[in-house]
Structures are given as C-alpha cells and as structure tokens.
Image (cartoon, rainbow, N blue to C red):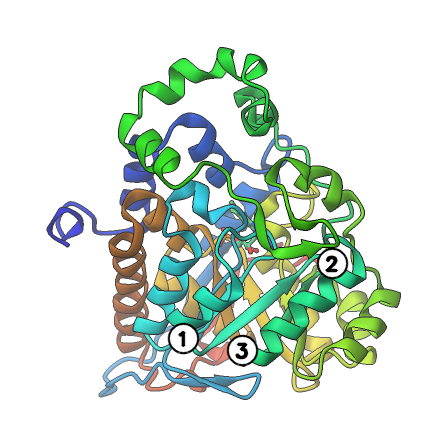
Amino acid sequence: MPRLASPHVINIADLRALARKRLPNAAFDYLDGAAEDEVTAKDNIAAFSEVVFKPRQAVMTNPDLATRLLGVDLAVPFLLSPIGYSRMLHPRGELAGAGGAARIGTGYILSTISGHPLERVREQNDKVFFQVYLMGGREATKRAFARAKALGYKGLFVTIDTAVAGMRERDHRNGMGPLMARALLPKLRYLPEIMRHPRWLARFLLDGGMPALPNVVTDTGPLQATDVGRALENAHVCWEDLKWIREAWDGPVVIKGVMGPEDALRAVDEGADGIVVSNHAGRQLDGVAGSLRVLPAIVEKVKGKTSIIFDGGIRRGGDIAKAICMGADACLVGRAYAYGMAAAGDAGVDRALEILIADLKRTMKLLGANTVKELSPDLVHLKPGFRVD
Ligand SMILES: Cc1cc2nc3c(=O)[nH]c(=O)nc-3n(C[C@H](O)[C@H](O)[C@H](O)COP(=O)(O)O)c2cc1C
C-alpha cells in the first residue's frame, strides 16, 4: 500500500486528514462528529493527556501483546468497535474492518446497523462479535441471533446508551436526513458538495447506494436505511430486555455504554460477562466526562468480577497502554480504524492497525513492560482533578 506508507501517513491524525480529503463533508462529518458542542468527544481525547507515564528504565523487553478476553485468544489487547454505516465510508465497510482485525489476530464487533451480512463478515474473521440494538423488535433480533450463533459468533455487545440518537449537529447541517431520503428533491441542495468527490460518489453508486440492513430482517424483509432513525427510537435496550437477551443468546454478553460504578455493578448483577466503559464516542449525551475519567471508579468496584473493556478517544497505541495500566482488560478502537477505512478501504484499516501496534510495542518497551499483565497501575500517575467518581 505505497500511498499510505510512512512518511506520508505516520499516525492516526494523518489518516483522519486523508479521510477528510477523500470523503464528502456529509460522510466525513458523520464519522468525525459527535453530539451538540462535542465537549465529551473532545474530553475523550484530552483525558489521555492527564495520565502521565512513570516508566521503569533499564529493563530488557520484547513485548508480547497477546491476551485473552471473553474466552477468545487475541494477539493484541484491543478489538475493533462497531461502526454503523461503515459501508458509507467505503463499499468494503464491515468486510474491511473484520478482515483487518483478522490479519492482526484480533476481534471485530459487527454493528446492528451494518451493510454487509453476518455471513460474509464471518468469512473474514473467526473472532467476530455482534453488537445489539433491538432494532426491528425482538423477532428480528432473534433472527439475527440465530444466524450469528450458527456462524460461530463469539458473543454479543449490547449497547445501552442509545435511548434516542444524540443531537449530532454536523449531520443536521449537512442534510444527512434528506440525503438518506428516497426522494431526490430534498437532496438537491446538498448534492454540489458531494459532486466534488467523484471517486467516492462513483464507488458509492456502484455499490448500490445506501443498502438495506441485511442483519435486521423484519417480517417485511431487511430494514431500509431510510427507516433506521425511526427504528432506533424503539430499539433501546433496558435492563429488562437484558434478561430476555440472556435467555435468547447462549454465550458471552457484554454491556456497552457503562459510565459509572452503579451501572457497572448492575451489569455484574445481571450476569454480564463484560462491560464497555464508553460514552459512544461522545455521540450521545454531550456533557458526560471523557470515558477515561470514569474508569478508575469503575475498576475499583468491579475489577475481577467481569471483563472491563475501555473505549473512547484512543488515537495512539500509548492510549491503549494507559487504559490497561488503569485497570482495563482490553480496549476498543473506533474512529482510529474507521478513518483508515474511509481513507483507503482495507489498506487504510491495515495501516491504522499497524500504527497502533507499533505505537503500543514501542510504548511498552519504553515503559519496561513485557506483557499486557505488566501494564500495571504503578506505571501511570493521574493528574489532580482527573477522576470523575
Ligand atoms: C461513525 C460511528 C458510528 C458508530 N456506530 C455505532 C454502532 O452502530 N453501535 C455502537 O454500539 N456504537 C457505535 N459507535 C461507537 C463506537 O462503537 C465506539 O464506542 C466509539 O467509536 C469509540 O470512540 P472512538 O471513536 O473515539 O474510538 C459509532 C461510532 C462512530 C464514530
């Protein structure tokens, strides 16, 4: 992948810049944007700079990044998070994500709002998980579970932070609603900007435009992309639904979207095999803390009782090291790989993951940590005022 090789793309910010160049505003902002003033999204990233490393020097290291999570061996301590509408970023979408994860020996979480079917995604990677919104109701969800189970999906990530879609102002300004609509007339105002990216447009149109959702099959067939907003409003998962999910799915269930110790404890009580400490990339409730800030209080309450997975704002391998030092068992990366996907499909995902792994190995060498287990609390210091309890 010569176009993405160093020195042109040396970090995730470079991939983001490339994605911005190659995507129309509406698609780039869908990926890059967050809710309202994007305070939480910014804090997800800023919080990392308030965690300071305390290295152990003069130690010989040859870092081993392998770990085990939810009964699955992973070659690296992070997985690729679910990104809805990935196929709008690049026609290969979820296939590129799952394939990239497989090439580095880790897991991929397929969003309910996905454009490629469970079956094809599974062909790319045997360490695949399914992210759950109750979209299309319990019957549609049951159908997806049955397919996922038969295909050997390793577990569910149930997202609990989406009672309603967050107010993503960039999407409103860019006309994402009208652009998704079937009628041409409302789109017209937004088309000139999109026409400025003929390569993206050609790929998108050749791919058939916005696909119906092959993994949300209702009584009337796959859910249309235009109906997703409405369906999402009735897709919110509550604790009562979780009991049903546990009965309907025989395998690991992880709760994604925990932002405080009370919900973490509740998840443990409900029998969750893991939790994801996450504020949905700041795309839901703006004004909550950067997710790293709530990690210490959650770790204090539930470490050892359930797997703790950290998510939000990871842009460097060193960020992964910090979250693990603070008690996470593993991390999810979202935009970091999705910028790569948007910039260059499979090659972009590969480059993003290569950067994160090189960063993480280098950080562990400089820290004097040989294994993921050795990434311990004594290697970091939290600046005063960092924690949110
Ligand atoms: C464009 C986009 C789409 C997303 N779609 C979903 C989704 O369908 N389901 C879900 O649980 N989380 C979704 N998320 C949240 C991610 O899974 C993850 O929590 C978040 O991206 C982590 O933050 P980061 O992007 O800073 O790494 C989405 C995030 C983005 C940026």
Residue linked to disc 2: 160
Disc with the residue nearer the chain's start (2 vs 1): 1
C-alpha gap between disc 3 and disc 1: 17 Å
- Residue that carries the numbered disc 3 in the rendered image: 151
Res. 24 visible in picture: yes
Judge the density around disc 2: few (<14), some (14-19), many (≥20) Cα neighbours within 10 Å: some
Q: Badge 3, how many Cα within 10 Å: few under 14, some, many 20+?
A: some
Q: Find out if the beta carbon at label 1 lies less than 8 Å from the nearest ligand 1 atom.
A: no
Label 1 crowding class (10 Å Cα cut-off): few <14, some 14-19, many 20+? Answer: many
Mark 1 — residue? 106
> Position of 81 compared to 160: left or right?
left
Q: Is residue 286 visible?
A: no
Q: Residue furthest front?
A: 220
Q: Position of residue 23 (x, y in %)?
A: 35, 33
**Helix, strand or loop under label 1:** loop
Q: Position of residue 384 (x, y in %)?
A: 58, 57
* Discs 3, 1 touching: Cβ within 8 Å: no
